[in-house]
Image: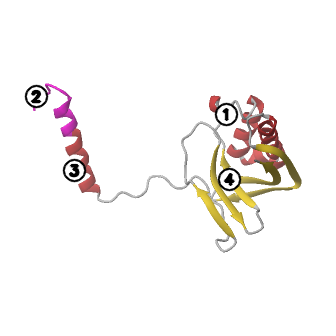
Amino acid sequence: VPRVDGVARRQEVVHWLAALATTWGTLPACAAPEWSCSLDPKEFKIEKRQESSVRIRPETMLVASDATKREVKLLKIPLGRGAATSFSPEDQIDLARYFASRQAAQAIGPSRIADIFRNSVERQVASPTSPLQGVVFDDSSVAVDTRKNRRYVSVDYLTDGC
């Protein structure tokens, strides 16, 4: 087939992909959810659930609430230039080390991760454009959970917003 323009090449690629798909049949899912969280569906109403994200800023992956107005939020925090407005370079290094290595996690500790989160939320509260009006953290609530080789840090806090 003469390649006078890109049309012949595109058709060739489409035919190749179709043949490949026919040969392999149905492919298994390539990506699994990036997180997991067990909530009782009888107790919590899920308002937002996102399995994965490629954004370069912190992203809320799950929001759920119960009848008493308690709210569960799961945040995905990317590191690097995009996270610079939320986290200092030192905080980013501690976050990366904590979640990358069990030994580093033991050395850094979950309370340091909770402090990083607290500092980020307090900066949001201080912003005049933020809907958050105040925040109160419960330092005794810091907890760690590991599921499927993924480490989670949780902390309870109350916010006032408009």
Residue beneath disc 2: 2
| Mark 4, secondary structure of its residue | strand
Label 2 crowd bin: few (<14), some (14–19), many (20+), radius 10 Å: few
Going by the image, does 115 lie left or right of 95? right
Residue beneath disc 1: 83
Q: Are marks 3 and 4 in contact (CB under 8 Å)?
A: no
| Mark 3, secondary structure of its residue | helix
Specify the amino acid type for callout 1.
Answer: Ala
Spatial CA distance of label 3 from label 4 is: 41 Å
Looking at the image, which residue is at 64% across and 28% down?
Answer: 81
Where on the picture, by quarter, is residue 38? Answer: bottom right
Specify the amino acid type for callout 3.
Answer: Ala
The first of marks 2 and 1 along the sequence is 2
Spatial CA distance of label 1 from label 4 is: 17 Å
The magenta segment is 1-12
Spatial CA distance of label 2 from label 1 is: 49 Å
The first of marks 1 and 4 along the sequence is 4
| Mark 1, secondary structure of its residue | helix
Which residue is most to the top? 4
- Can you tell which mark lies on residue 74? 4
Q: Nearer the viewer, mark 1 or mark 3?
A: 1
Q: How many marks?
A: 4
Going by the image, does 24 lie left or right of 85? left
Specify the amino acid type for callout 2.
Answer: Pro
Judge whether residue 126 is colored magenta: no
Q: Nearer the viewer, mark 2 or mark 4?
A: 4
Residue beneath disc 3: 19
